[in-house]
Image (tube, rainbow, N blue to C red):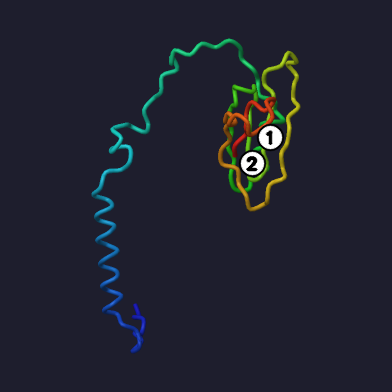
């Protein structure tokens, strides 16, 4: 095996010191507890399906709503806004809202909000009550992204 010729201008002593520091940090990291151990929780634990929740009705998510995931480029999230009977999906900088509480079982229509900049990514969606006197009295919820 041939050895790589050493350059006269390169300080191998500094490189060796950096290498030792990195190795020490890695040893310290391996010796520390991981997050699951710190939380005293086994990450692979089975979750109980008997959580005490009552189900009034099961509603199927429209296939069109789920197909939106095919277009994900960087980030996607999903959730419910039960105060307004809407499910939401954010895909990159697009927000989709679906009215899941309707008499029509074939309700596959949803609203798209896509006026956001391409560099903006929607990570979460929630509702908030507006401060009295700021908006018209008809505004009861504010959509926060």
Left or right, 143 with respect to 12, comes to: right
Residue at the location (68% across, 42% down)?
Answer: 94
In the drawing, does residue 21 fall left or right of residue 102?
left
Q: Is residue 69 or residue 84 the one in the foreground?
A: 84
Q: Which of the marked residues, 1 or 2, is nearer the chain's N terminus? A: 2
Q: State the quadrant of the C terminus.
A: top right
Q: Nearer the viewer, residue 12 or 116?
A: 116
- The disc label shown at residue 74, or none: none
Residue 95 drawn above or below residue 10? above
Q: Nearer the viewer, residue 6 or 48?
A: 48
The residue sitting at the bottom extreme is 8
Residue at 55% x, 12% y is 55
Residue 39 image point, x, y percent: 30, 35
Is residue 138 depicted above or below 102 in this figure? below
Q: Is residue 97 left or right of residue 45?
A: right
Instruction: Report helix, strand or loop for mark 1.
Output: strand
Label 1 close to label 2 by CB (< 8 Å): yes
Quarter-of-image position of residue 66 = top right
- SS for dot 2: strand
Find disc 1 in the rendering and name its residue.
96
Quarter of image, res 95: top right
Q: Which residue is at 59% across, 37% downward?
A: 144
Q: Quadrant of the N terminus?
A: bottom left
Residue at x 75%, y 19% (from the top left corner): 106
x and y percentages locating residue 74 in the rendered image: 60, 48
Name the residue carrying label 2. 91
Mark 1 to mark 2 CA distance (whole Å):
8 Å
């Amino acid at each position: 095996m041939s050895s790589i010729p050493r350059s006269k201008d390169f300080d191998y002593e500094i490189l060796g010191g950096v290498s030792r520091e990195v190795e020490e940090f890695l040893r310290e990291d391996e010796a520390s507890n991981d997050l699951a151990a710190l939380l005293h929780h086994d990450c692979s634990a089975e979750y109980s399906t008997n959580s005490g929740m009552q189900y009034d009705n099961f509603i199927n998510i429209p296939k069109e709503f789920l197909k939106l995931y095919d277009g994900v480029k960087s980030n996607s999230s999903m959730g419910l806004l039960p105060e307004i009977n809407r499910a939401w999906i954010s895909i990159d900088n697009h927000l989709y809202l679906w009215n899941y509480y309707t008499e029509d079982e074939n309700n596959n229509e949803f609203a798209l909000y896509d006026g956001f900049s391409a560099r903006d990514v929607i990570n979460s969606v929630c509702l908030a009550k507006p401060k009295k006197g700021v908006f018209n009295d008809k505004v009861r919820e504010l959509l926060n992204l």
